[in-house]
Amino acid sequence: MNILCPRCDSPRIEITHHGRKAGGTVGTVAGTASGVAAATAGAEAGAALGVVGGPIGIALGGLAGAILGGLVGGVAGGTAGATIGSQLDGVVFDNCRCSACGHAFSVKQS
């Protein structure tokens, strides 16, 4: 698909993806926080049941659970946020910028 600037008819167009970038960032932060919180709650329950493993086992298990929960939550949140942000590109945000004249405009992407 060849996009031309509506102001100067230049073919030098950059796709900016503002929505995808913002959504991915917000989703990653929210997903990481949610994943760590869920993993921390799970680590507390595991600590109550895992007294047999001793204090070192409980501490390492809780830390590993929080890290893995944060990573999984961050990836899931980032993917969901980027998908939602992509839907906003071209509808809410100007998703194209002309390199020749600097004009920002929207083009519906398929």
Image (spheres, helix red, strand yellow):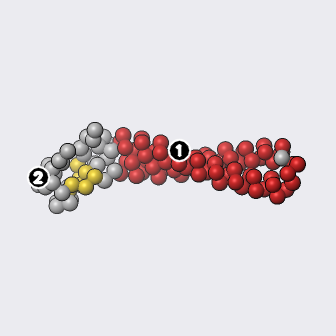
Please report whichever mark, 2 or 1, sits nearer to the chain's N-terminal start.
2
The answer to whether residue 27 is seen in the rendering is no
- Please tell me how crowded label 2 is: few (under 14), some (14-19), or many (20+) other residues with Cα within 10 Å: few
Element class at badge 2: loop
Q: Foreground residue, 93 or 27?
A: 27
**Residue displayed at 25% across by 55% down:** 14
Q: Which residue is mark 1?
A: 76
The answer to whether residue 23 is seen in the rendering is yes
**Residue displayed at 84% across by 43% down:** 49
Determine whether label 2 and label 1 are within 8 Å by CB: no
Q: Of the numbered discs in the image, which one, if any, rests on residue 9?
A: 2
- Toward the left, the furthest residue is 9
**Three-letter amino acid code of the residue under disc 1:** Ala
**Residue displayed at 26% across by 40% down:** 108
**Three-letter amino acid code of the residue under disc 2:** Asp
**Measured from the top left, where is residue 60 in percent x and y?**
76, 56
**Measured from the top left, where is residue 19 in percent x and y?**
37, 48
- In the displayed structure image, the side of residue 102 where residue 88 appears, left or right: right
**Measured from the top left, where is residue 3 in percent x and y?**
18, 48
